[in-house]
Amino acid sequence: MNLNEKTATELIKLLNSKACSAVEVITDVFSRIKKVEPEIEAFITLTEESAQKQAKEVDEKRARGEELGPLAGVPVAIKDVICTKGVKTTAASKILKDFVPTYDATVVKALQSAGAVFVGKTNLDEFAMGSSCETSYFKQTKNPCNTEYVPGGSSGGSAAAVAAHETVLALGTDTGGSVRLPAHFCGIAALRPTYGRVSRFGVIPMCSSFDQVGPMGKTVRDLELLFDVVKGADPKDATSFEHEDEKNAKFDIKSLKIGVPKEFFGEIIDPDVREQTLKFVEALKHSGAQVIEVSIPHIDYLLPTYYTISTIEVASNLARYSGTQFGFRSQTFKNLEEMYENTREEGLGAEAKRRIILGTFLSSAASGEDFLGRAIEAKRELAQAYSEVFEVCDLLVTPTSTTPAFKLGEVTDPEKMHATDLPTVGPSILAIPALTLPCGFAPNGLPVGAQLIGKRCEEQLLFEVGKFYEENCR
Amino acid sequence: MEYDVVIGLETHVELATKTKMYCGCKNVFGGRANSNCCEICLGMPGTLPTVNKKAVELAVKAGLAFGCRINTKTSFARKNYFYPDLPKSYQISQDSQPICQGGFLEILLENGQKSKRINLRQIHLEEDAGKLIHNEEFGVALVDYNRGGVPLIEVVTMPDLCSEQEVKAYLETLKNALVCLGVSDCRMQEGSMRCDVNISLKPAGSQQLGTRCEIKNVGSFSGAVRAVECEVARQKRILESGGEIEQITMRWDEEKGENVVMRKKEEALDYRYFEEPDIPVVELKESEIEQIRADLPELPNAKLARLIKDFDLLYVEANLLATSPEKCELFEELATALKCDAKKACNWILGDVTRILNERDAQLRESKLTASKLGELLLLIEEGQISNTAGKTVLEEIMWAEVTPQEVVAQKGLAQVSDEQALRAIAAEVLQENPQVQQLYAKGKTNILGFAVGQCMKRSGGRGNPVIFKEIIAKLITN
């Protein structure tokens, strides 16, 4: 039956009809893992024993006729920046290599209540900073579509695990594009929710103003399933809020107005990526959607605004990793200063250090400028530009990145690496939702994913458009 | 050369809430090290702060009492620095939109003869840090995070203070007000009130302020006074010898009795403040603020003024009552509802009642004394049924037992004898045995009467009415 290749939607049907058991599902997933994981290296920690226990419990509950959660028996992988009680959570960093939280993230608790079965903790760029999964302290995850290529980042492990059928669903985190970019590189679907719709409690922060937990899966329908379980206000997260998604409205493709911002289809975008994304737009147009060319000025504010705000917050969020009350501590020091310096020198990777130094500089009095103030001004102007565009259309379609997946070790210039985020940082800065779904392939066989950008809290519209495309246009 | 001293104070006060500022841990003093912390106040990865509403209320209460402007939109900010007692390596404080701005405290100087307004810059909310304990034996510093996350307000004055006496008066006024408001218990020995002192000197009358130095973490009123004295003397010495003041930060060392240098200007910390992204702007409703305003009690200084005016009390006695809420309540009930003589009520409360309480190191609420019992006692004395001396004996009983003054008088047979005949007999005896009384009185030493009355009181076992004794003796002598 090749259960590991099924979607969550399909598995739930099979499990409900008792065509298979949860134990059979997880066993098949783990035998797949044993086969491909040595090469793919998507996981930092595998939790096979507890997964088998959880699956058994689901089967027993079903046999007893007890009520089951909406994801009962479905295997889910968790990015290793989301805290799991009693299970090592490392943020792919040496400084947390042995850290075992005594608490679960709220999203983990939600998945437990829903009956999900946890496969393990997936690899990422250290502290969620990166676009290629190459800065992990532990291992290099490969792109299952071609193992000479990167899976994207920072949620590279989660994306690869889904693409390689080492899990059915996964949670990643998205700060500047970290679920969308790897989804595009690996040919799967991912959602960056509206900021605040999913709790951040227990999620090791990179940039607190932009971080969001994002569902990742094989189909948009699967994304919706997972999002419905993890969304919602959490009293432990003061930035979270409740919103009811309208599930019963009838979706009509003919009434859809799609905005295509010309600035995201110019020279900066790889021609293959551009071509596939435009084909996606054509397919929707062919089905009856209206396509409107729009313009978003100031896109050159996007990366500086994003990197100013995020590095300033990174410098602050990573300051607690000092070897004081938890985590790695250097063995060589003579006084407090040296303990701090040596612990962080030895424990943090190059990209983390780079962003801490940049963020410290940008927020310091010594820099002589109020960079944060300027970034906030730029953010205001960007918000104005996007809101004007959203007055004439319901959603935007852009490429997810300037490039398809690149080879391992190919991109060494940090600035070039950061530039791959250009199409994804906008929704992060503006706290609006964005969804990436596979829409084609580059000539070299690597996938291309189109990005749908919606108005605040309009995840449901993004789901409907994605599902329509999956069911009618592929 | 004469110098003006310019002082500004930043006082950190722990708030009387049930739980910590950003998590659900209990807000209690002491306990086994690290027994009162959770993943949030320990700054564990991924944890988030949530604001304690009660702390915000108490800050608003203090702000309203001091005439501050309350910011209905208030926000939090991160103050970033590395130190082992700060788990997140940043403190969540306030920066651009503190909860209260402006305001003032009225302080009284020279025993109430002078008053001075000390303006406030602001009051803001923040969290306390843990405590570092230096272990000399093992050459390590141990950290106890129990105190980490406890809610604080920081009360910041303008540089309006000019002397150590003013500093002391300000701290006392602030403490009494905050205790009266129920905002804090201000127990300096438990560290729930600490201050940082900023001092500079300038030539007398000059408009230009001098370079300011900071003395951190002063934990007692006497410490504050001495720290100021030391620093003023130090700065004077430097300026008078033609030197320049270097901007330094010091720490007051209570044991050494001196200010110890912590850091100099070049090492000054840049806190890189930015708005706390984990806490959205807190919005207060006008109705919430009005409710807090309506529940404000009368502040000690206002009470002090009223007691002096309405009851004709002296500053010293009014001040003692104003700063002792329970005794003041007792006094006011006696002086108004029970219509006792205010002066007498005040004397009894601040005199014998206080003495008896102090003997047992007790608070008034722990005794069995009520306004009606004390009022009854005062009435018995007023009517001459018992003497003042007997009254003290009665007081000892009614303080700790469920008995009325009448009952004690009856039990102990303390009723004053006012029967003229009986008293005359005793007075005659005393005068006979003490012929010098009449002699000295004839020479004009009229206060010998007091001695004679005393003798009569002794002979009557304290039960004679001293007023009548005096009259009788005076009559007998002059006849």
Image (cartoon, rainbow, N blue to C red):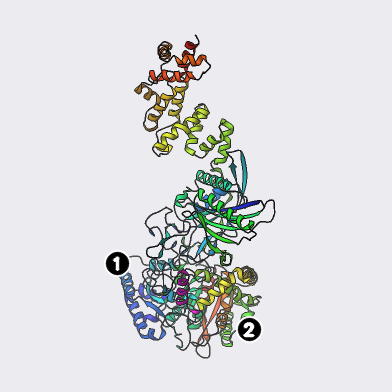
Q: Nearer the viewer, residue B412 or B468?
A: B468
Point 51% across, 70% down: residue: A211
Amino acid under disc 1: Arg
Q: Is residue A85 above or below residue B449?
A: below
Point 46% across, 75% down: residue: A342
**Residue A9 visible at all:** no
Q: Main secondary structure of the magenta part?
A: helix
Q: Nearer the viewer, residue B318 or A117?
A: B318
Residue named by callout 2: A266
Q: Position of residue A337 (x, y in %)?
A: 48, 70
**Residue B478 visible at all:** yes
In the picture provided, is A251 more to the left or to the right than A104?
Answer: right
Question: Which of pointers 2 and 1 indicates the residue nearer the eye?
Answer: 2
Residue named by callout 1: A64
Same subunit, labels 2 and 1: the answer reads: yes
Q: Position of residue B25 (x, y in %)?
A: 42, 57
Amino acid under disc 2: Gly
Task: Please provide the residue range marked out in magenta.
Answer: A335-350
Q: Residue furthest top?
A: B479
Q: Is residue A94 above or below residue B167?
A: below
Give the number of the disc on residue B151: none
Packing grade of label 1 (10 A; few <14, some 14-19, many >=20) is few
For marks 2 and 1, give the CA distance.
Answer: 59 Å
In the picture provided, is B127 more to the left or to the right than A119?
Answer: right
In the picture provided, is B85 more to the left or to the right than B201?
Answer: left
Q: Position of residue B169 (x, y in %)?
A: 56, 45
Query: Mark 2 near mark 1, Cβ–Cβ under 8 Å?
Result: no
Q: Earlier in the sequence, mark 2 or mark 1?
A: 1
